[in-house]
Image (cartoon, grey):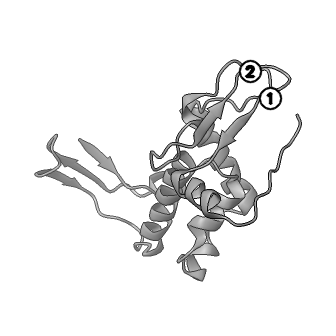
Amino acid sequence: ILWKCEVQRKLNCHARLHTSLDNKVILKLIDTHNHSGNARSQHIRQFYENMKDEALQNHTSPHNVLTQCYMGVPDEIRAILPNNSNLKRDVRCWRQDKLVASIPADKNFQTVPDLYKKTSRGDNFLRTDTGPGNDRMLILCTDEQKQILETATVRMIFAENL
């Protein structure tokens, strides 16, 4: 496998490395780096990896994904990350590439996509779906939320017409 420096084009670095297919044996070293290393690049890669995982596992808004991923990121790393609108666009692109099931636009959709029947932890979320029609009712809650509702002393029902 041929490895090239990640800033080959940007800094015209000709450092390369040849390894065996399992990456355990270095077969050949070609040239040396013409620049110093960037200690922050590891943190940036880790941030992007965390952000991509969060985006694909959580179906919250891109803003919430960013908020979750920013926790624990040092200020010097935040300063060199792209602006929030670019990062949010990355989240949307990753989700689109994964072909996430579309969110139903009205109450006459046939069935709830399987993706929305369970939480990201695998817990049941869709409790009841009465089917398409003007009197359609969806009941959505986790086991924990159901238990809280069953033990509540004050009961209210919130409904939204589409």
Q: Going 59% across and 66% down the picture, which residue do you hit?
A: 68
Q: Going 45% across and 50% down the picture, which residue do you hit?
A: 121
Q: Position of residue 112 (x, y in %)?
A: 64, 28
Q: Position of residue 55 (x, y in %)?
A: 57, 50
Nearest the eye: 136 or 122: 136
- Amino acid under label 1? Ala
* Distance between the alpha carbons at the discs numbered 1 and 2: 8 Å
Residue 159: quarter of image: top right
Q: Going 17% across and 48% down the picture, which residue do you hit?
A: 23
Q: Disc 1 marks which residue?
A: 105
Q: Secondary structure at mark 2?
A: loop
Q: Secondary structure at mark 1?
A: loop
- Residue at far front of view: 153
Q: Disc 2 marks which residue?
A: 109
Task: Locate the C terminus and report the quarter of the image it occupies.
Answer: top right
Q: Position of residue 131 (x, y in %)?
A: 70, 22
Q: In the rendered structure, are the residues bearing label 1 and label 2 in contact, judged by CB atoms less than 8 Å apart?
A: yes
Nearest the eye: 91 or 7: 91
